[in-house]
Image (cartoon, rainbow, N blue to C red):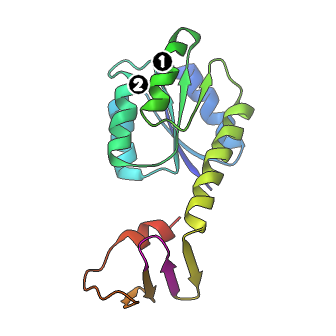
Amino acid sequence: MPSILLIEDDVRIRQSLARALAGRGHDVDSVATGLEGLEHVISHTPDAVILDLGLPDLDGVEVLKMIRAVSQLPIIVATARDEEAEIVSVLDAGADDYVVKPFSGEQIDARLRAVLRRIDQGSGSTTLEVGDLVIDGRSREATLGGDSLELTRKSSTSSPTWRSMSAT
Ligand code: CA
């Protein structure tokens, strides 16, 4: 079940959206401020974030940049009509998609599934798993039962990247 973090200060929108997404098979956590959202991303590593731009503590674009500084997880920005001018800047800052309020649970669910599908395809094309054998095409490393295998290149450094990539 994909875990979604919802960062939204409006309590009614937050509750109805959390309910709608939970009803569509997502595991939803929600917070009301940008700072809490950033802390949650670091401590819980959700699969995707829905970020409201108009937050009480921090500018949404700044929250987006801070999340991007620590994670490449999919971020969908939720914006009110009067914030639409910001869409270009949030896409430039690394948002994967956006929705304009008011939006339905159905629409945000469809957009979430789309960004999560792209993530799945991205890692699936580079990581091959056969039983205990895991081959990471991107870093050209292989492990068997968690132990690094020496491939063509001689290297004594063991990279942790395959673990995070194959974990999803
Ligand atoms: Ca808001």
**Magenta segment: does it hold 26?**
no
How many angstroms separate mark 1 from mark 2 (CA)? Answer: 10 Å
Specify the quadrant that holds the N terminus: bottom right
Q: Which mark is residue 60?
A: 2
| Amino acid at pointer 2 | Gly
| Marks 1, 2: nearer the viewer | 1
Farthest residue, direction right: 106
- Quadrant of residue 14 within the rendered picture: top right
**Magenta segment: does it hold 135?**
yes
Q: Which mark is residue 69?
A: none
Image coordinates for residue 134, horizontal then vertical, percent? 50, 82
Sequence order check: which comes first, mark 1 or mark 2? 2
Image coordinates for residue 113, horizontal then vertical, percent? 67, 46
* Disc 1: residue Cβ within 8 A of ligand 1's nearest atom: no
Image coordinates for residue 68, horizontal then vertical, percent? 38, 42
Residue at disc 2, secondary structure: helix
Specify start and end residues of the magenta stretch as a single range: 133-140
**Residue depicted at x 58% and y 88%:** 131
Label 1, on which residue? 86
Q: Are marks 1 and 2 in contact (CB under 8 Å)?
A: yes
Q: Please state which of residues 50 and 121 is positioned toward the viewer in this rendering.
A: 121
| Amino acid at pointer 1 | Glu
Residue at disc 1, secondary structure: helix
- Tell how many labels: 2
Q: Please state which of residues 65 and 152 is positioned toward the viewer in this rendering.
A: 152
Q: Vertical placement of 89 versus 164: above or below?
A: above
Q: Vertical placement of 161 versus 26: above or below?
A: below
**Residue depicted at x 71% and y 39%:** 110
- Quadrant of residue 63 within the rendered picture: top left
Q: Please state which of residues 102 and 153 is positioned toward the viewer in this rendering.
A: 153
Disc 1 crowd rating (10 Å Cα; few below 14, some 14-19, many 20+) is some
Farthest residue, direction left: 156
